[in-house]
């Protein structure tokens, strides 16, 4: 695929599939395939295996490779695959090369997990990964509110395969400024905080958004995208109202239950187990009925 086609794939609902587990705590590949088919059959065309909703940091390196391979096998030519990579540079490069060999088209580079991140070091980190796989599109995942747009512009100058940005700083005004400092038309801008922030980020220049909710209700996420593409902000806010409580539950307590709520909803629909790995937790009994009711309402 050309970089232009990859950019088009990012200007969409970028689904972050969950990673289901068996009762023994291993990868539930059968349930995983079922969930992926459900997304594809629902109209989703861009998938991110090994994203945060997929519990990237709770998976072993072997499990992350298996998730990548399973997703590519199940999707075939029905979707563009954006594989999450990260950790130290050698680990990220190894994962990037594995993704390329497995047939992926793009990488999402997780925000560096390090207590001391300099802006120049951020550029060096992403450059090392992007240059290792020049054929693949690369999408930095930005959660650092300190990082300036000029640094992304610098990265884009030396790495033409950096095609888009998953921007996940909870500040729509900062996003709008960052995008313009980096180059609004140089990159595809993906609202990395999902549906709750999509309307405000689209107003600032985003053309796609990530979603964990899409695992539960693909039609709801696609309805919001359709409204935003049409410039129908009142329509997009009607969808926002539908998803508000679900996303509030995910965001509570510093997003402690971000993935948990999605898995609980899927469990209530009989699609996978609710099991989740530490440091996340299963949802308390007191909140399960509310999540189940929301999920059931979206299936009606």
Image (cartoon, rainbow, N blue to C red):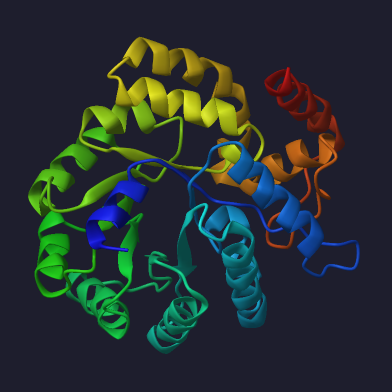
Q: Nearer the viewer, residue 62 or 223?
A: 223
Relative vertical location of residue 166 with respect to residue 172 in this rendering, above or below: below
98 left or right, relative to 197: right
36 left or right, relative to 219: right
229 left or right, relative to 161: right
Residue positioned 78% across, 21% down in the render: 293
Give the x, y percent position of residue 86.
45, 73
Classify residue 120 by image quadrant: bottom left
Residue positioned 56% across, 24% down in the render: 243
Q: How many marks?
A: 0
Classify residue 190 by image quadrant: top left
Give the x, y percent position of residue 5.
29, 54
Give the x, y percent position of residue 11.
32, 43
Residue positioned 49% across, 18% down in the render: 239
Is residue 157 something that shows in the picture? yes
Is residue 28 something that shows in the picture? no
Quadrant (top left/top right/bottom left/bottom right) for the C terminus: top right
Relative vertical location of residue 102 with respect to residue 246 in this rendering, above or below: below
Give the x, y percent position of residue 141.
36, 58
Quadrant (top left/top right/bottom left/bottom right) for the N terminus: bottom left
Q: Residue furthest right?
A: 23
Q: Nearer the viewer, residue 75 or 46?
A: 75
Relative vertical location of residue 278 with respect to residue 191 in this rendering, above or below: below
Residue positioned 27% across, 34% down in the render: 172
């Amino acid at each position: 695929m050309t970089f232009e086609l990859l950019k088009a794939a990012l200007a969409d609902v970028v689904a972050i599939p969950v990673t289901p587990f068996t009762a023994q705590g291993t990868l539930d590949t059968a349930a995983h395939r079922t969930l992926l088919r459900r997304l594809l059959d629902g109209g989703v065309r861009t998938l991110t295996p090994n994203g945060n909703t997929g519990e990237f940091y709770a998976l072993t390196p072997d499990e992350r490779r298996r998730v990548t391979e399973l997703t590519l096998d199940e999707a075939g030519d029905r979707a563009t695959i954006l594989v999450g990579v990260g950790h130290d540079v050698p680990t990220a490069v190894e994962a990037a090369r594995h993704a390329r060999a497995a047939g992926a088209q793009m990488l999402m580079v997780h925000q560096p997990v390090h207590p001391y991140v300099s802006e120049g070091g951020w550029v060096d980190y992403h450059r090392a990964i992007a240059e290792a796989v020049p054929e693949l599109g690369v999408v930095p995942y930005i959660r650092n509110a300190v990082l300036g747009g000029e640094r992304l512009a610098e990265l884009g100058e030396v790495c033409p395969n950096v095609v888009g940005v998953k921007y996940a700083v909870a500040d729509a005004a900062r996003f709008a400024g960052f995008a313009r400092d980096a180059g609004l038309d140089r990159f595809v801008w993906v609202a990395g905080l999902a549906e709750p922030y999509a309307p405000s980020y689209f107003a600032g220049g985003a053309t796609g958004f990530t979603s964990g909710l899409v695992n539960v209700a693909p039609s709801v996420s696609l309805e919001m995208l359709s409204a935003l593409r049409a410039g129908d902000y009142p329509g997009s806010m009607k969808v926002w109202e539908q998803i508000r409580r679900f996303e509030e539950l995910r965001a509570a307590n510093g997003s402690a239950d971000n993935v948990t709520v999605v898995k609980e909803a899927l469990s209530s629909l009989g699609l996978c187990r609710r099991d989740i790995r530490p440091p996340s937790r299963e949802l308390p009994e007191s909140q399960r009925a509310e999540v189940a009711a929301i999920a059931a309402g979206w299936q009606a």
